[in-house]
Image: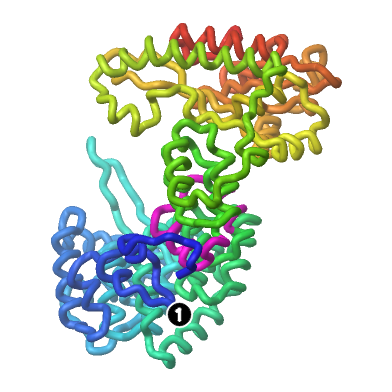
């Protein structure tokens, strides 16, 4: 693994295998589900896998395996003739409990798809009985079928009146997510397969790739991680078509190029688990820094951001150090960053670099904003934190959630990011520019009285990072109907307004006016409650002052700001 990345043995054990770097812990500790999974690794034990799979399915089946088989037999009358025949063959084989000497691929797939047996129990048996090439074909076929069901209402309970098969790839995204553990097992087995089996399996995958839906493309590139062109193609299609989901993005981040990885985590933030992050680091080494940085910038809060920061801190290069320094103003991340530079003092930026103080003494607006937020921070800690503790929270829990400091998630924005924003929207109002530079963006916590009987917890206001503003602008304007501009012409031109804040849960957005140079008015747009109403604007600093005053009233709605 790359010399610029600092590893622990525990972290190495969580990396997904590939042929050039087999991880023996990948199958045993990383994704093991029991003896059946271990038996799928040579030497194979087909009889043991079959017995365990059938035994587990018969005990775990909803309302018993007989009921599942009965529903398939009833559902056959709803299916196309070929699918009805296949479903009945699968039900008959499952009912018999016999293990065929030679497996029928369609029948085995039908047993899994009709939910008579879990896929993660079937796959080790397939591997043990027929090998990795056959199993790959079965997994591909599994994503060409789906089950349907018909329900009728007998009494207070809902009952199925049948389950049957249909030919479709429309459910591939859901299926890849459901079968992700099976794809991980397949990747591990392919990493240690002999050359002939690996070559044959790759030929099967290559033949299926072009016509496969995006999630299956992602799965194929995941189990053949050396096929970078496949992964890049799948990532491009994923972003273009919006196909996928968290687990599809995870697969692609471990296999596609870094530039695609940056875009994927921007599009689907918060989806990366530890195995994905460590596999990315094992593959790219220090080159993984841009993806981890993108994940930090688009994280949905400091708890997520801290996970990504820990992995970025494994990289000991000047590039990684500069990316971490940009978050030094984030109180939640500051201890990790200081520890990083204690361990790697040679990477500490010079005083004239990124760590230069951000609040010029002569900048009166910046100083006023700093005082405003520090005053709110003091009030929150003295007034609201004791309430949370009285309500049953432990201080360690509040610290873990990031609830001790309402401004802990806010991070100053770099001049480079501000320059990118001004290139798109033109010169920013001076007060807003000062806010970005000394306070920054992220989540601001504010008190919210819970419903009677519910536990207290903060609510959030989200100041939008400049990198996210163009996308947010598109999302917010999409809600406007055709007549909005005519009705609100006297208020503001929406096309010349920039979203600066969104409120979690209530969809009340604050939008900064850019009607002309020097116009720093902020309007609150109540698109959820009153879709066509926008308040008269107030100056930006006054908007912030009113917002913080409102927060002290423990009212999450920004009406009247």
Specify the quadrant of the image occupied by residue 523. Answer: top right
Report whether residue 215 is seen: no
Q: Secondary structure at mark 1?
A: loop
Specify the quadrant of the image occupied by residue 126. Answer: bottom left
Report x, y in % for residue 230: 58, 72
Specify the quadrant of the image occupied by residue 530. Answer: top right
Crowding near the residue tagged with mark 1, few <14, some 14–19, many ≥20 C-alpha atoms within 10 Å = few
Report x, y in % for residue 519: 80, 17
The residue sitting at 39% across, 25% down in the picture is 403
- Left or right? Give the position of 274 relative to 289: left
Report x, y in % for residue 64: 15, 58
Report x, y in % for residue 124: 27, 75
Q: Which residue is mark 1?
A: 20
Closest to the observer: 150 or 2? Answer: 2
Say whether residue 273 is magenta. yes
Above-or-below relation of 384 to 331: above
Report whether residue 453 is seen: yes
**Magenta residues, dominant SS class:** helix
- Left or right? Give the position of 472 relative to 37: right
The residue sitting at 39% across, 59% down in the picture is 275
State the extent of the magenta-drawn residues as a range. Answer: 261-287
Say whether residue 32 is magenta. no
* The N terminus: image quadrant: bottom left
Closest to the observer: 258 or 314? Answer: 314
Closest to the observer: 441 or 9? Answer: 9
The residue sitting at 44% across, 33% down in the picture is 332
Closest to the observer: 264 or 154? Answer: 264
- Left or right? Give the position of 476 relative to 67: right
- Left or right? Give the position of 28 relative to 365: left
């Amino acid at each position: 693994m790359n010399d610029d990345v600092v590893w622990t043995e525990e972290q190495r054990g969580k990396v997904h295998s590939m042929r050039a770097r087999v991880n023996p812990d990948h199958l045993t500790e990383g994704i093991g589900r029991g003896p059946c999974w271990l038996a799928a690794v040579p030497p194979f034990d087909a009889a043991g896998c079959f017995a365990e799979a059938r035994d587990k399915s018969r005990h775990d089946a909803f309302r018993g395996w007989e009921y599942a088989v009965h529903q398939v037999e009833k559902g056959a009358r709803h299916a196309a003739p070929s699918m009805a025949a296949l479903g009945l063959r699968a039900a008959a084989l499952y009912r018999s409990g016999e293990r065929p000497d030679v497996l029928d691929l369609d029948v085995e797939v039908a047993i899994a798809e009709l939910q008579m047996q879990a896929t993660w129990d079937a796959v080790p048996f397939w591997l043990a009985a027929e090998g990795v090439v056959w199993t790959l074909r079965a997994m591909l076929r599994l994503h060409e079928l789906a089950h349907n069901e018909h329900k009728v209402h007998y009494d207070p309970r809902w009952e199925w009146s049948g389950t049957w098969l249909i030919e479709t790839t429309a459910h591939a995204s859901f299926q890849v997510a459901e079968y992700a553990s099976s794809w991980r097992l397949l990747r591990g087995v392919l990493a240690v397969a002999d050359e002939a089996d690996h070559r044959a399996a790759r030929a099967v995958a290559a033949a299926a790739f072009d016509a496969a839906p995006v999630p299956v493309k992602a799965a194929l590139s995941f189990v053949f991680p050396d096929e970078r062109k496949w992964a890049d193609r799948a990532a491009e299609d994923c972003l273009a078509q919006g196909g996928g989901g968290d687990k599809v993005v995870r697969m692609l981040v471990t296999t596609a190029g870094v530039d695609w990885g940056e875009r994927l985590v921007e599009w689907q933030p918060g989806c990366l688990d530890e195995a994905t992050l460590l596999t990315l680091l094992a593959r790219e080494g220090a080159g993984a820094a841009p993806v981890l940085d993108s994940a930090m910038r688009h994280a949905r809060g400091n708890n997520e951001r801290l996970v990504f920061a820990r992995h970025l801190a494994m990289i000991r290069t000047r590039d990684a150090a500069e990316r971490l320094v940009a978050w030094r103003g984030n109180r939640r991340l500051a201890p990790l960053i200081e520890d990083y530079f204690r361990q790697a003092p040679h990477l500490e930026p010079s005083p004239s670099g990124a760590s230069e103080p951000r609040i010029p003494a002569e900048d009166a607006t910046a100083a006023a904003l700093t005082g405003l937020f520090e005053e709110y921070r003091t009030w929150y800690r003295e007034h609201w934190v004791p309430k949370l503790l009285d309500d049953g929270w432990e201080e360690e829990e509040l610290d873990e959630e990031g609830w001790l400091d309402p401004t802990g998630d806010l991070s100053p924005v770099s001049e480079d990011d501000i320059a990118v924003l001004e290139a798109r929207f033109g010169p920013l109002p001076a007060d807003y520019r000062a806010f970005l530079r000394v306070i920054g963006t992220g989540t601001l916590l504010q008190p919210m009285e819970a419903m009677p009987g519910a536990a207290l917890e903060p609510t959030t206001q989200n100041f939008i990072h400049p990198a996210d503003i163009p996308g947010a602008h598109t999302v917010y304007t999409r809600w406007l109907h055709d007549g909005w501009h005519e009705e609100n012409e006297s208020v503001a031109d929406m096309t010349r307004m920039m979203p600066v804040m969104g409120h979690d849960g209530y969809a009340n957005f604050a939008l900064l006016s850019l009607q002309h140079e020097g116009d720093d008015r902020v309007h609150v747009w109540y698109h959820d409650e009153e879709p066509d109403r926008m308040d008269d604007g107030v100056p930006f600093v006054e908007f912030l002052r009113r917002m913080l005053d409102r927060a002290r009233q423990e009212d999450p709605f920004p009406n009247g700001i």
